[in-house]
Amino acid sequence: MAVDPEKTSPRSRPELFAFHGVHMTHFFTDNWEKVQNFQARPDDVLIATYPKSGTTWVSNILDLLYFGQSERQTSIPLYTRVPFLEVIWPPMIGTEDIEQLPTSPRLIKTHLPIQFVPKSFWEQNSRIVYIARNAKDNVVSYFHFCRLAKSHPEAGDWSSFLQRFMEGKMVFGSWYDHVTGWWEKRQTYSNLHYMFYEDLITDTGREIDQLCSFLGMSCSAEEKERVRALTQFDQMKNDKMANFSTIHTMDFTISPFMRKGKVGDWKNHFTVAQNEQFDEDYRKKMKNPKLQFWTEV
Ligand code: A3P
């Protein structure tokens, strides 16, 4: 596929456009045919999230659980160990990066809403781990990320960003549809483990236990504890292979990628009026009583 260097230049921010009913940028749609025809394997593990829900954290946990602490962790960036399926920002091309993975299983990251997931994942019955995060912290984290990441449209000011989030005018679309779509998929697809960022924060050890059982792994208590300790926020914040500091399209003078790693930071951003408006809108959009989030712990 021909790539327009102007479009990929970090000088220009991409435009947001509606794509099959979901807002996207060309960095995630230019390779669409190859993404849709991607051949999953039965032992692939797909890590799926709405952006800013703990993707990097869980990717690191799974990478350590499967492959242990080795030279890979200290020499290969996490985004190369766990390629991003739909991204096309040369030299990063998700589908090609996955093909080149030497590991088995292959760990693959995606932010696609459920209806866009390549059908081979369902056909191969691959394992999928979905991580969801409460909407208020998610939008705050996304706001800061859009300020620093040139792969996304400009964040603008906080109040307009919040408004656009409520309208689903974000890259990868509506948070509400994303978390609900994946939640409902559990009813028909059993190889999907749905977890919450807030649970990971409150009891990382328990969540790692549950991940091990879902993945059919028999990890010793010592191994699990080692993984838990190695993936603590401060550890990852200082880990150059996990903190995205090797990516030049992110401007860390604006905000670090590993920003706060907390539940409840939304309280430092939402005004009382914004919170009331958000809650009212949330009640209208989130109709499934079984899908509940903690906004504080
Ligand atoms: P904040 O911006 O709220 O700090 P993703 O990896 O999906 O892009 O999500 C990024 C968010 O997860 C950021 O949230 C980041 O700080 C947080 N995060 C990453 N690693 C973490 C860890 N080990 N513990 C807690 N939070 C983590």
Image (tube, rainbow, N blue to C red):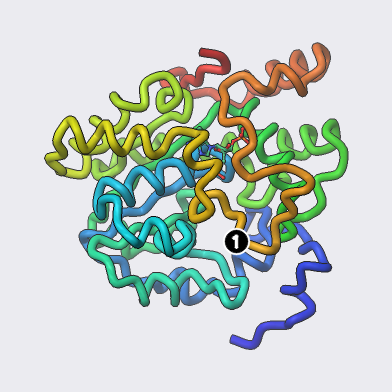
Q: Secondary structure at mark 1?
A: loop
In this view, the residue in front, 252 or 202, is 252
Q: Is residue 74 left or right of residue 137?
A: left
Q: Is residue 265 left or right of residue 188?
A: right
In this view, the residue in front, 200 or 245, is 245
Counting from the top left corner in percent of width and height, residue 212 is at: 21, 38
- The residue depicted at 16 percent of the width and 39 percent of the height is 219
The residue that label 1 is drawn on is 246
Figure check: 230 above or below 153: above
Give the quadrant of residue 42: bottom left
Q: Is residue 237 left or right of residue 268?
A: left
Give the quadrant of residue 143: top right
- Circle 1 packing at 10 Å, graded few (<14), some (14-19), many (20+), is few
Figure check: 249 above or below 184: below
The quarter of the image holding the N terminus is bottom right
Figure check: 118 above or below 148: below
Split into quadrants, the picture shows ligand 1 in the one at top right
